Amino acid sequence: MTAIDRTLSKADEKAVIAEAEKAVSDIKKARVETAKVIFGQETVVERALVTLLSGGHGLLVGLPGLAKTKLVETLGTVLGLNAGRIQFTPDLMPSDILGSEILQQEENGKRSFQFVKGPIFTQLLMADEINRASPRTQAALLQAMQEYHVTIAGVRNDLPAPFHVLATQNPLEQEGTYPLPEAQLDRFLMQIDVLYPELEAERRILLETTGQTEAKAKAVLTAKRLQEMQMLVRKIPVGESVINAILHLVRSARPGGSTDEMNQYISWGPGPRASQSLMLTARARALLDGRLVPSVDDVLALAEPVLQHRMQLSFAARAERITVQDVIGSIKKSVG
């Protein structure tokens, strides 16, 4: 048994099992409701829900028109969260996100500054095309994403709880964009790649979104219930084999971290935050799948979305057309 396992007494185990069974039922309702609006993106929906259940932020990477915005709106509705959207543009300023102080005059003539909250003060924030904003504006999100508060004029302003950022990014059109710095990429729990839908899913999209009426999702959870499930995820026991798999994956993804031939192509790799992310997301994925204990398969399934944005390959790798996905795939094969 691991140290995590030993922290659960028999009474605690029964309580966790009861909580988990109720959570599985609630998650199933949320998935069914989401599927009424989002068609053929089961993996994307699963990873987005895993991200939120783990209490983290997600980076949705995909071409325009693949329902990224619709997904965030739908999840906000289904999970009962207050949702907001910011369209990132080159002229967007930090104050446009965080808010600013304005000078107000009272009836007696006294003047004072009052803080007017920006759109970041919401529970689920969609940062649309985040890489179109300047580095200064991108940096405005850093404190919020990590510390869940912002500081304006030396005063701390707490964000609503729970607080999650789901940002979108176009992988192809890079003109007029600013690549996200490594420090900010590391704040994202997962990079969720949004691909083209399958044939039958696209057929359903045609039939169900071009008529006189269109399906709409309804709330099945509340913000408080989501927070309870996030706490439950942290109580789920993790076996030694899962911990070893996480450590092996993350450490092998660093320069000199393994003897794998692909390791020579890694310029820099993930830090301990990646290990923490894999630990949380493996638990959340197990719960999403109706299981009370995560397995090594959960770790392997989440290795790419958790690690790919935390790695950089060398020039030699790019010259030989080796991708991050190739390297991660090679590392996964070495997990026994």
Image: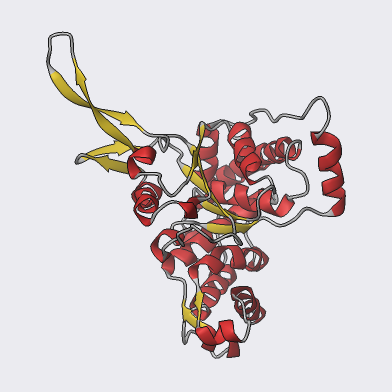
For this view, does 152 lie left or right of residue 299? left
For this view, does 6 lie left or right of residue 287? left
Q: Is residue 292 visible?
A: no
Q: Nearer the viewer, residue 333 or 336?
A: 333
Which of the 4 image quarters holds residue 207? top right
Above or below, 55 against 160 in this view is below
Which of the 4 image quarters holds residue 33? top right
x, y percentage for residue 145? Answer: 40, 49
Q: Report the residue at 61% width, 62% height from top.
A: 172
x, y percentage for residue 277? Answer: 50, 60
Q: Report the residue at 67% width, 52% height from top.
A: 44
Above or below, 106 against 74 in this view is above
Q: Nearer the viewer, residue 12 or 324?
A: 324
Q: Nearer the viewer, residue 156 or 208?
A: 208
x, y percentage for residue 324? Answer: 59, 75
Q: Nearer the viewer, residue 233 or 254?
A: 254
Above or below, 317 against 174 in this view is below
